């Protein structure tokens, strides 16, 4: 199957999916989210695939976030739908896959990019990777599960600091925080992911799927948090700060927020 924004390659039973919009730093637009859903759904039912590696094209970015240009003019209702649909098609979808998905974080993983990496089961970063949830600098909040999954991975204190400062942390700090499992030189990133995949493919696919279902079942009680995130994300689209934040990004200037 041919995709506009994805490249697929398979080695033995390991499928690598590369998000391929390097001139837009692999930002997740509607089409890319739909294509990822399609490719992942096919991989999930394909007996020839045991592990999936997800990465970004080019040397600069894994994914620099949701596509800001695409949603800047959205209404509150469209904002809410963007979040709900994205969570269903991609972020919850990845987390609930029956096969391990390894994020090979090869550069910037910001906003929806970090949210995508956090939806994966295992994260490996290159030493030049940078991670953050910069949404509040645009007048919006993480809407693809970031308020929930970041808190699960690094704890409430660090999550509240990272989200409110909109700051980026380097890969080594992400390793200290437990946000990624390994950091390796950029040239060794895919080899490291393939090494982990090689260990996984020796084991029982059905037992791994069972173990993942069991691990995730403990987090299901947090469903209310994801709903709250969708609602709050939508509300941001009705603020002056959102118009200022996204406008400033597109005009390549610093925003001035009023809190309205
Ligand atoms: N959505 C849409 N386009 C994006 C994007 C995003 N999230 N991130 C980057 N791009 C685009 C830029 O607009 C630019 O496009 P242009 O050449 O058509 O103007 C292109 O990708 C290259 O990005 P640029 O900003 O020129 O690269 P840089 O090296 O100067 O900065 C970043 C890199 C990642 C720091 C910067 O692109 C950035 O801050 N991106 C947004 C991150 C973000 O806020 N993500 C959360 C979204 S909710």
Image: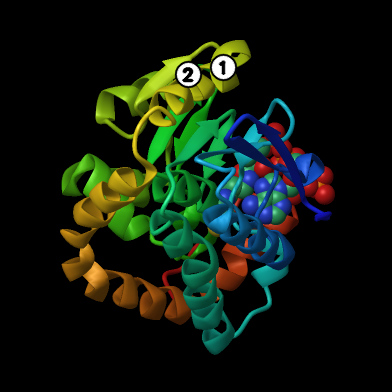
Residue 182 or residue 95, whichever sits in front: 95
For the C terminus, which image quadrant?
bottom left
Q: Residue at x 52, y 85 (%)?
A: 76
**Going by the picture, which residue comes out furthest to the bottom?**
77
Q: Position of residue 219 (x, y in %)?
A: 20, 60
For the N terminus, which image quadrant?
bottom right
Q: Position of residue 150 (x, y in %)?
A: 31, 48
Any mark on residue 195, and which?
Answer: 2
Q: Quadrant of ligand 1?
A: top right
Residue 8: which quarter of the image?
A: top right
The CA span between labels 2 and 1 is 6 Å
User: In the image, is 242 to the left or to the right of 24?
Assistant: left
User: In the image, is 51 to the left or to the right of 247?
Assistant: left
Any mark on residue 191, and which?
Answer: 1
Q: Residue at x 24, y 40 (%)?
A: 154
Proximity of marks 2 and 1: CB atoms separated by less than 8 Å: yes
Is 218 rendered above or below residue 153? below
Q: Residue at x 53, y 82 (%)?
A: 81
Residue 256: which quarter of the image?
A: bottom right
Any mark on residue 50, and which?
Answer: none
Colour style of the rendered protein structure:
rainbow
Is 155 rendered above or below residue 171? below
Query: Can the viewer see residue 136?
Result: yes
């Amino acid at each position: 199957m041919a995709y506009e924004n994805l490249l697929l390659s398979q080695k033995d039973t390991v499928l690598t999916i590369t998000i391929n919009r390097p001139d837009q730093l692999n930002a997740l637009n509607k089409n890319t989210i739909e294509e990822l859903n399609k490719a992942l759904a096919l991989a999930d039912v394909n007996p020839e695939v045991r592990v999936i590696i997800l990465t970004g094209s080019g040397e600069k970015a894994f994914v620099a976030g949701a596509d800001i240009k695409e949603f800047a003019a959205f209404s509150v209702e469209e904002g809410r739908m963007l979040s709900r649909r994205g969570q269903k098609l991609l972020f919850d979808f990845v987390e609930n896959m029956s096969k391990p998905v390894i994020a090979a974080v090869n550069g910037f993983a910001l906003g929806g990019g970090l949210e995508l990496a956090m939806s994966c089961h295992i994260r490996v970063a290159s030493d030049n990777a940078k991670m953050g949830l910069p949404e509040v600098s645009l007048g919006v909040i993480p809407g693809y599960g970031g308020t929930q999954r970041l808190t699960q991975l690094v704890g409430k204190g660090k999550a509240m600091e990272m989200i409110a400062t909109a700051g980026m942390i380097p890969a080594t700090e992400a390793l200290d925080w437990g946000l990624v499992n390994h950091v390796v030189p950029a040239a060794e990133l895919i080899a490291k992911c393939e090494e982990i995949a090689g260990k996984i493919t020796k084991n029982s696919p059905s037992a791994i799927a069972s173990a993942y279902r069991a691990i995730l079942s403990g987090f299901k009680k947090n469903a209310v948090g994801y709903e709250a995130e969708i609602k709050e994300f939508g509300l941001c689209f009705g603020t002056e700060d959102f118009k200022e934040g996204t406008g400033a990004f597109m005009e390549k200037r610093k925003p001035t927020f009023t809190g309205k």
